Image (cartoon, grey):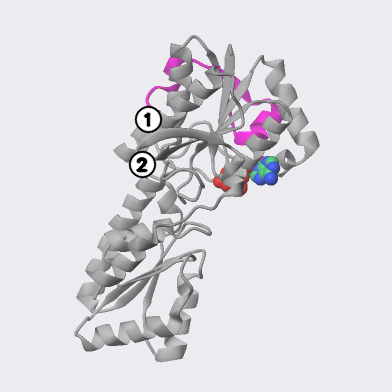
């Protein structure tokens, strides 16, 4: 392989820049040229592509977001859009593509691979919802952002003896809520992986109050319901008054943690190694602290599973 491309796509995540840097520098180190594709698949179709040198990815390892920009591109879901993309790649002598993004972006990578253009998926999403990898790039940073917010909200919750509902991101996955709930000492965590039990929650809150708990932190994953909806339910059902905080997009931003930078560097470099072996249709991940590669199709055949032992533990520790 003489030249490869790299793009970031879908929801941005802290650490994407560190992954781009790793792809570019690892390839250059091995004498392979790299083209950076701007604005994800949209930029690919439009030919928004520039060659990158080692210096072009300097000073981005510590930056959140993505210097290559990201976009959502409905046209790329069509056959014609994918053909245009392949023409753009071939025109520039690009022989393999590294796609850094979430599962939607992976579907695009699989589509191109099935049309004969080798693609590698690197997991970049704060949701930690990609099957086959224990962690995705951006999850750790987002988690730490959420923890910082919980700590701050806890200060005011304690001072005013109030209960707070904090809504966190994660789409259909509960990982961010689960980890944040355990690390933030939340009284209750509500995630899509566990059947919703409002009556049980009411009981827990009332029992806690009887035991002398003056405030409580409830973490709700956006995939279950909004914090506002939950607050309304608690008020209507049991006259329990809460304050609501929706953390929103601050969870996506910020300088990546050391852990995310290391993960991004490892996974980005591995993607290049796989392309150097002339393999495509491969996903990169980390399992039991080992960098792994696996069939991109497995991402869609398997399910990501949250570690529910953490859910049980959180319940035990929040008595
Ligand atoms: P994420 O990668 O974070 O899951 P999206 O689901 O928005 O984000 O996907 C990002 C982009 O990937 C989409 O805008 C589209 O261009 C491409 N994509 C998503 N699904 C498919 C699909 N089924 N086939 C081809 N491309 C897809």
Foreground disc of the pair 2, 1: 2
The x, y position of residue 14, in whole percent, is 42, 41
The answer as to whether callout 1 falls within 8 Å of ligand 1 is no
Q: Quadrant of ligand 1?
A: top right
Is residue 158 toward the left or the right of residue 206 in the image? Answer: left
Q: Which mark is residue 35?
A: none
Which residue: 45% across, 79% down?
Answer: 197
Could you tell me residue 209's position as x and y percent? 25, 85
Where's residue 125, x and y in %?
A: 48, 45
| Image quadrant where one finds the C terminus | bottom left
Q: Nearer the viewer, residue 22 or 64?
A: 22
Quadrant assignment, res 89: top right
Residue 45 falls in which quadrant of the image? top right
Q: Give the magenta range.
A: 34-60
Question: Separation of disc 2 and disc 1 at Cα?
Answer: 24 Å
**Residue 288, numbered label:** 2
For image coordinates 38% across by 61% down, the residue present is: 178
Residue 311 percent location from the top left of the image: 35, 65
What residue do we see at 37% from left, 86% from top? 240
Q: Which residue is denoted by mark 1 in the rendering? A: 61
Task: Confirm whether the magenta stretch covers residue 241.
Answer: no
Q: Secondary structure at mark 2?
A: loop
Q: Considering only vertical position in the picture, is 96 above or below 131?
A: above
- Image quarter of residue 34: top right
């Amino acid at each position: 392989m003489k030249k490869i491309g790299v793009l970031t796509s879908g929801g941005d995540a802290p650490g994407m820049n560190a992954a781009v840097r790793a792809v570019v520098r690892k390839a250059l180190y091995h004498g392979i040229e790299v083209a950076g594709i701007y604005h994800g698949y949209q930029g690919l179709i439009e030919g928004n592509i520039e060659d990158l040198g080692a210096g072009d990815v300097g000073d981005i390892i510590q930056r959140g977001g993505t210097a290559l920009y990201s976009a959502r591109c409905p046209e790329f879901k069509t056959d014609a859009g994918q053909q245009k993309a392949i023409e753009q790649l071939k025109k520039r002598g690009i022989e393999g593509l590294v796609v850094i993004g979430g599962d939607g972006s992976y579907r695009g990578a699989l589509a191109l691979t099935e049309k004969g253009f080798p693609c590698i998926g690197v997991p970049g999403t704060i949701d930690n919802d990609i099957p086959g990898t224990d962690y995705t790039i951006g999850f750790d940073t987002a988690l730490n952002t959420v923890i910082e917010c919980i700590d701050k909200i806890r200060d005011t919750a304690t001072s005013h003896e109030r209960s707070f509902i904090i809504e966190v991101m994660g789409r259909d996955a509960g990982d961010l809520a689960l980890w944040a709930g355990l690390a933030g000492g939340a009284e209750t965590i509500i995630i899509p992986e566990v059947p919703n039990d409002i009556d049980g929650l009411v009981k827990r809150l009332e029992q806690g109050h009887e035991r002398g708990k003056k405030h409580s932190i409830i973490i709700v994953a956006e995939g279950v319901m909004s914090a506002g909806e939950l607050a309304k339910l608690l008020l209507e059902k049991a006259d329990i008054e809460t304050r609501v905080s929706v953390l929103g997009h601050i969870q996506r931003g910020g300088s990546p943690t050391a852990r995310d930078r290391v993960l991004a560097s490892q996974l980005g470099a591995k993607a290049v190694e796989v392309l150097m072996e002339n393999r495509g249709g491969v996903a990169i991940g980390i399992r039991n602290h080992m960098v792994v590669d696996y069939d991109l199709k497995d991402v869609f055949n398997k399910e990501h599973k949250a570690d529910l032992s953490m859910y049980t533990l959180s319940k035990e520790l929040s008595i």
